[in-house]
Image (spheres, rainbow, N blue to C red):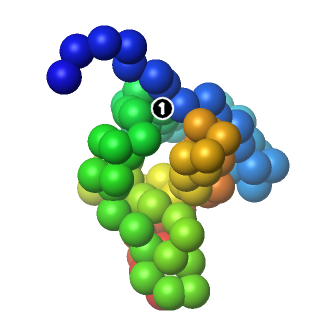
Amino acid sequence: MGGLRIMFEFSSTSVFDKKFKLMLKKDKVLANATKNKIKEIVSQNTQTIDIYKNLKKPLQDMKRIHITGQYILLFKVYKENNMILIVDILHRDVAYK
């Protein structure tokens, strides 16, 4: 399948922005891993974005990706607008409660 590869645009919530700003100061390794995962997500197209796992109800409109063994990045996909919304980053113990 050749041709043009369309990447997603992305934005983030204020919740994520605050956590990421703090992460840049306290844990540069996690911040770098997070940046790399965001790049990976937005480089997908409307077909390949579905490789990421959807959460269960009531959060079924969100997807997740593991950043490290301990952290999970939550995001929403708006295929019709070609947009990704980075929602939050959570420790796995908190995310799965």
Residue 77 is at least partly visible in this image:
yes
Residue 42 in the image: x percent, y percent? 48, 32
Question: Which quadrant of the rendered structure holds the N terminus?
Answer: top left
Q: Position of residue 83 (x, y in %)?
A: 62, 39
Residue at left offset 61%, top offset 46%: 80
Give the residue drawn at x 22%, y 15%.
Answer: 2
Compared with residue 25, is residue 3 higher up or lower down, i.e. above or below? above
Report if residue 24 is visible in the image: no
Task: Tell whether 36 sits left or right of 22.
Answer: left
60 relative to 47, above or below: below
Instruction: Please state the horizontal and vertical placement of residue 82, each as a whole percent of the image.
Output: 59, 37
Instruction: Check disc 1 and report its element: helix, strand or loop.
Output: helix
- 72 vs 26, nearest the viewer: 72
Tell me what residue is drawn at x 53 percent, y 65 percent.
Answer: 62
Q: Amino acid at mark 1?
A: Val
Q: Nearer the viewer, residue 81 or 52?
A: 81
Q: Is residue 85 left or right of residue 53?
A: right
Q: Is residue 61 above or below residue 80?
A: below
Residue reaching furthest left? Answer: 1
Q: Name which quarter of the figure residue 22 lies in.
A: top right
Does residue 51 appear to the left or right of 22 in the view shown?
left
Q: How many marks do you count on the picture?
A: 1
Frontmost residue, 24 versus 66: 66
Q: Residues within 10 Å of mark 1 (few under 14, many from 20)?
A: some
Picture coordinates of residue 41 (x, y %)? 42, 37
Residue at 50 percent of width and 76 percent of height? 60
Q: For mark 1, what is the residue?
A: 42
Q: Residue reaching furthest top?
A: 3
